[in-house]
Amino acid sequence: MDQPSLYDDIVSGTEQQASALRALSPRSDLSNMLDWENVAEEIENVGRSQAQAGESLRTQSPVHLLKRLSAPRTLPVEHWRRQVEAFQIGARGRCEPSMSQRIDWFNGWAATQELAKPGRTAYGDTLISNLSFQCSLDVDDPLVTPFYIDDALLRIAETTILKSPEKH
């Protein structure tokens, strides 16, 4: 079988299975008692749900990295670090090859910044200023083993440095 198995990659597999059901639906020799379109949709929803869970786990790592970078001297700093590690482990166990190409990683950076705000305001901290419009981490970085948190923090911090204006 050249195509991915449902068990190898749940997202691609469910799309493949739903497509196969839709292709069978017009056949008059098959039972009309089955609601082919809804069954295909339910199968696709399984794949979408898995993809959303994987994306959520990947997104939580940069959220907690931003919290840690923005409030380095607060009590929950080590908790945020442990959270990054936990999300990394979860993402590696949950994410499949086809998920990376489906994640709008760079446009989701603004949402990541918004998600990082509530965890710091309780301590009077604000989000680190001058953040880049795009995430300096790659969509697959949360899946890398080992994931070096300090390197990731540095990569994010480096994008916040303002270049001095050019003299004319």
Image: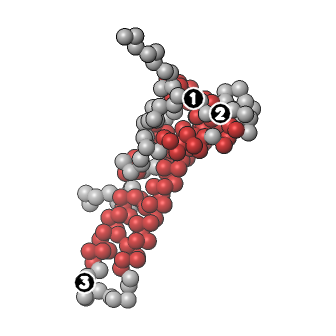
Say if mark 2 contacts mark 1, CB within 8 Å: yes
Return the residue at label 2.
126
Return the residue at label 3.
27
Residue 123 point in image, percent of width and height: 74, 35
Identify the disc placed on residue 156.
Answer: none
The N terminus: image quadrant: bottom left
Return the residue at label 1.
129
Between disc 2 and disc 3, the foreground one is: 2
Which badge, 2 or 3, comes first in the chain's sequence?
A: 3
Q: CA distance from mark 2 to mark 1?
A: 8 Å
Q: Residues within 10 Å of mark 2 (few under 14, many from 20)?
A: some
Q: CA distance from mark 1 to mark 3?
A: 60 Å
> Image check: 50 left or right of 8?
right
Residue at the image position 48 percent from the left and 41 percent from the top: 109
> Given the current orientation, which residue lies at the most extreme front position?
168
Residue at the image position 73 percent from the left and 30 percent from the top: 74
Q: How many marks?
A: 3
Residue 43 point in image, percent of width and height: 42, 69
Residue 18 point in image, percent of width and height: 35, 69
Say whether residue 21 is visible. yes
Residue at the image position 34 percent from the left and 68 percent from the top: 17
Circle 2 SS class: loop
106 versus 158 height, above or below:
below
59 versus 123 height, above or below:
below
Q: Residues within 10 Å of mark 3 (few under 14, many from 20)?
A: few
